[in-house]
Image (spheres, grey):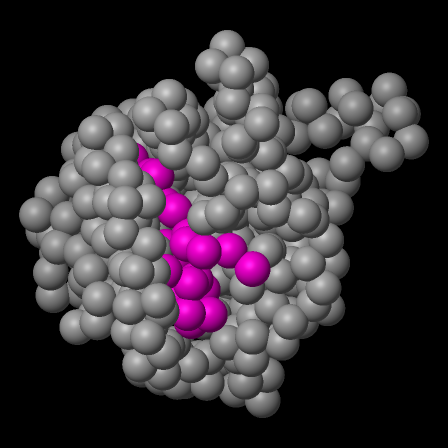
Amino acid sequence: MKSVLFFIESLDGGGAEGVLERIVAAIDKSKFDVHVVSETDNEFRTARIKADSKHHCFIHKNLTGSRIRALFNKVIIKYSLVAPPSLVRSTLIRGKYDMEVAFCEGYSTKIIGNSSDKGSKKIAWVHTDFINYPWSEEIHGGAEAERKCYEKFDAIVCVSQTIKDAFVKKYGMEEKVHVIYNVIDDNKIIERSAEPFPLEVARRPFFVLAGSFRRVKGYDRMVRVCKRLKNEGYGFSVIIMGIGYERDDIEVLLDELDMRDTITLMDYQENPYKYFAKADAYVCSSRAEGYSTVVTEAVLLGLPVITTECSGMREIFGDEECGIICENSEDGLYRALKKVLDEPELLPKFHKAEEKRAKAFRMDARIKEVEKFLEEM
């Protein structure tokens, strides 16, 4: 049996965290002894990760309000950010493993890339487009430092071909870069989509969006596009589901543009699929993506997709017309939504194409691909 460490900064409600949760749940435990390390406990996915792995975290949340605990946590987090990465790896993660996986860019990659355990294979899992959204450069102190960190890894996994192309274009290393698509639990998604729908939809078509409230998700431009369409006399409804530090900005924008009667914000939903099942289309307004799990889930459920041109979208659609991939701009998104509003017969056409495409997203095949890769490492 091989021991595998997955290190990820957060176990909250993001896409990469969800992929890790599904890998940890489904991977063959007779072949792999799975360990997961994150910074903090009691996050959205922590309990489920603990149920399927040996979990360890840097700090425990201060649920009692203890001043000593608060001070201790502050010191540990400060130490984790300023200490040499190799020291963070040896003191806060600890242990020896056959494989060490940095499951996200930035901090996780910086720590695992500098692990001093020479006996373990180092794997970096890349979810972002390093050309169009190079957010992780800052964590390393610049592109050159990031490149040198990735050179220390034995293998680099990209979650789509377009992510791989961007990585290789920027940093090279093609000989050790692999593509493994995100794991989704197709049976669970289909089953949960049948749960009762809790809301009345005021106007059709009904569009849904789901993800973290961060600028990269483009919710601000979705709101502005909807305002333009509303001003032109179109009627429709929108729900945006998620959590994140920029939600307050979207709340303010909704009030400024008087869009509360059209757009509803909801907290992160453990089961967004019951909303997907009743929606007319899924909208991805992102400025950048890696390989969108939620768009894959929408296609799996036969929900037509209107998305900006981001990494992985054409791979998700394959040869089928699962929706509209538009120019990655506010105007591009406006034209795509307007087209669907003007030509409602498009949505049933997209749905039929997705019924064919959905067969490509079975969980068993993708987990076997992950296991095969780890075994070969």
The C terminus: image quadrant: bottom left
The residue at the point 47 percent across, 39 percent down is 236
Give the image location of residue 155, x and y in percent: 26, 64
Viewer-proximal residue, 322 or 175? 322
Residue depicted at x 34% and y 39%: 285
| Image position of 331 (left or right of 292) | left
Q: Position of residue 351 (x, y in %)?
A: 36, 69
Which residue is more in the foreground, 186 or 148?
A: 186
Residue furthest front in the image = 233
Q: Quadrant of residue 142?
A: top left
Count of residue discs:
0
Residue at the image position 61 percent from the left and 46 percent from the top? 201
Find residue 12 and report its image quarter: top right
Above or below: residue 102 compared with residue 35: above
Q: Position of residue 255 (x, y in %)?
A: 56, 14
Q: Is residue 259 left or right of residue 350?
A: right
- Relative to residue 267, is residue 139 depicted above or below? above
Residue 283 magenta: yes
* Residue 185, visible in the rendered structure: yes
The answer to whether residue 150 of the structure is visible from this angle is no
* In the foreground, 49 or 300: 300
- The one nearer the camera, 146 or 210, is 210
The magenta segment is 278-304
Left or right of residue 171: residue 241: right
Query: Furthest residue to the top?
Result: 256
- Residue at 85% x, 23% y: name it: 68
Q: Position of residue 62 (x, y in %)?
A: 82, 32
Question: Magenta stretch containing residue 67, yes or no?
Answer: no
Q: Furthest residue to the bottom?
A: 30
